[in-house]
Every structure is written in C-alpha cells, then in structure tokens.
Image (spheres, helix red, strand yellow):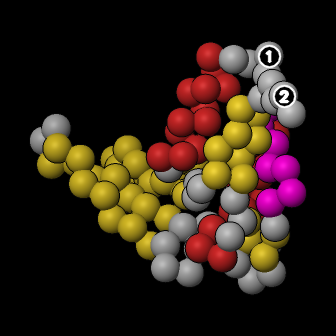
Amino acid sequence: MTGNGVASIGECMLELSGQAGPNWRMGFAGDTFNTLWALHALSGDRPATYVSAFGDDPFSRDQIGFFAQNGIGVGASPIISGARPGLYAVTLTGAERSFTYWRGDAAARQL
C-alpha cells in the first residue's frame, strides 16, 4: 500500500493566548496538530488529515471548519454528542510562557 498524504492523530485544543487586558485571542493548537500544520505547509500538494474525536458544539464545528478552510480533513473521526474540545491558556511572565489546561472531559479523550 502506498500513501501520498500526511496524517496526525491526537487532540487539537482551543488555545487562548495574547492576553491584552481582559481580551484573549482564540485559536486551535496542540502538539500533534501543530506538527500536521507544519508538514502540510511543507507539502501543500499532498492531502492532510487530522484524526481525533470531536464534539458537536459550536467550538468543535468551528474547529472542523477551520481545518477544511486550510485543506485539512478529519477523515472518519467520530463526532461525539455532548462533547467539546479541550482548552488551554498561555500566560506570560516576562518571556516565560506558562500553560493552564482544561481537558479532562475533552472529546479526544474518547478516541
């Protein structure tokens, strides 16, 4: 069997970063997703698939939509009713980054 695409398996979370006062920027990130993102950027002519489990909430729908807009599919990843993505926040103390996670009931834990 020969494959010509790139795939990654894991958990893509909601990322809160860039705090300026009470405002945060939200994006999608996580080690396995960031790796796929970089591989896809280097080989944009090859299909990219992110394998995970997703919720059926608005954040999960936005996440899947973001992937699709950037040429990344989700293959046969399950959509789990009532589930949602994990969340983490990045805070800075000087140049030192700290991470706080909320992911105990994330959809990807059911994959």
Q: Residue furthest left?
A: 94
Which residue is pictured at 67% across the width and 26% down the height?
A: 40
The kind of secondary structure the magenta stretch mainly shows is loop
Quadrant in which residue 68 is drawn: top right
Which residue is pictured at 64% across the width and 52% down the height?
A: 9
Q: Is residue 21 visible?
A: no
2 or 1: tag closer to the N-terminus:
2
What whole-number distance in Å separates the C-alpha atoms at marks 2 and 1? Answer: 16 Å
Q: Quadrant of the N terminus?
A: top right
Q: Residues within 10 Å of mark 1 (few under 14, many from 20)?
A: few
Residue 53 rendering spot, x and y as whole percentages: 72, 65
Residue beneath disc 2: 2
Residue 32 rendering spot, x and y as whole percentages: 54, 46
Task: Check the image and report above or below for 45 versus 23.
Answer: above
**SS of the residue under disc 2:** loop
* Nearest to the observer: residue 110 or residue 58: 110
Q: Nearer the viewer, mark 2 or mark 1?
A: 2
* Nearest to the observer: residue 9 or residue 1: 1
Q: Quadrant of the C terminus?
A: bottom right
Quadrant in which residue 59 is drawn: bottom right
Task: Check the image and report above or below for 50 versus 59.
Answer: above
Residue 54 rendering spot, x and y as whole percentages: 73, 66
Magenta highlight range: 69-77
Q: Is residue 32 visible?
A: yes
Image-based side of 18 in relation to 55, left or right: left
Residue 45, numbered circle: 1
* Nearest to the observer: residue 95 or residue 20: 95
Q: Residues within 10 Å of mark 2 (few under 14, many from 20)?
A: few
